Amino acid sequence: MSASPSSSAQAAREVLAARLGELRKDAELTGHELALRCGWSPAKSSRIERAKTPASDADIRAWCQACGAEEQAADLVAANRQADQMHVHWKKLHRHGMRRAQEEIVPLYEGTRNFRVYCSNVVPGMLQTEAYAAALLSTIATFQCTPDDSPEAAASRVERSRVLHEGGHRFALLLEETVLRYRISDAETMAGQLGYLLAVMALPNVSLGIIPFTAERRVWPLEAFYLFDDRRASVELLTAAVNVSAPSEIATYAKAFSQLADIAVYGPDARVLITEAISSLP
């Protein structure tokens, strides 16, 4: 599939091609020698390495085997499969409003058994009340200059969160204490949202940790990210969502989550931080 050289998909392919080129050089192979080992023409090796021809999964595995780097094949295949959807720009995703974006990820939520979520800026979507979600989504639509369907999108987000109350799903959620203090909406909405966090903590399939201001940091505050089992990480940036499926990258996010979890407080200590945040509201 052709793509503009400036597109995210093409950029991802060029990164992949560069990594394949590095493997060939590390193995001290010429393009011709690699082609002989793979059983294809030297021209094909050149096109793949210059990102002129997208490599198939089989091409990547053959390339790695020829270079004696079979252990890297899984990561490279995952990166190849994600080239077209690695970066999903919010303005493109929300160009017709945000309700559709909420509905499109329902299958991912329904198919995930173990959620690990870290948020440093806002309450994660699956824990948002409808009023909090509507206020946040309206702010996002205004900033992005996209259609504001925040009431409908908020209702859809809350409906999507029914997985919290269904069997077969477990949730480990970490929030920075700042999330409890940021005024996303008015005091009444914030009080309702914080009160809902207290209620959600009682669910047997939910672990909610709060990382206090006073925690001795082992990991610095990061951008928000979601881990869906061990098969996908979704990272939320200002301009785009970055979807990661390479095993080594997922493992890095899992490591960060584990270390952040170690400095969080839970149960009664977490409840104290939430109730203090409620008490601070005017």
Image: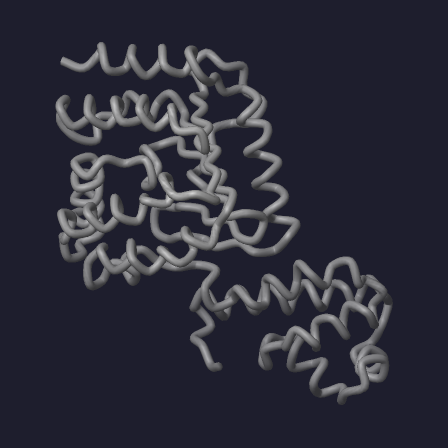
* Furthest residue toward front: 167
Is 213 situated above or below 22? above
Is 210 situated above or below 70? above
Image coords of residue 86 (percent x, y): 48, 60
Q: Residue at the spot x=74%, y=71% of the render?
A: 61
Residue 4 appearing in the image: yes
Query: Does residue 216 appear to the left or right of 241 in the view shown?
Result: right
Image coords of residue 141 (percent x, y): 19, 50
Residue placed most toward the observer, 24 or 248: 248
Q: Quadrant of residue 206?
A: top left
Q: Quadrant of residue 163?
A: top left
Residue placed most toward the observer, 152 or 121: 152
Q: Quadrant of residue 254?
A: top right
Quadrant assignment for the C terminus: top left
Residue 173 appearing in the image: no
Residue placed most toward the observer, 90 or 258: 258
Is 50 situated above or below 18? below
Q: Residue at the spot x=86%, y=67% of the render?
A: 28
Query: Does residue 232 appear to the left or right of 159 in the view shown?
Result: right
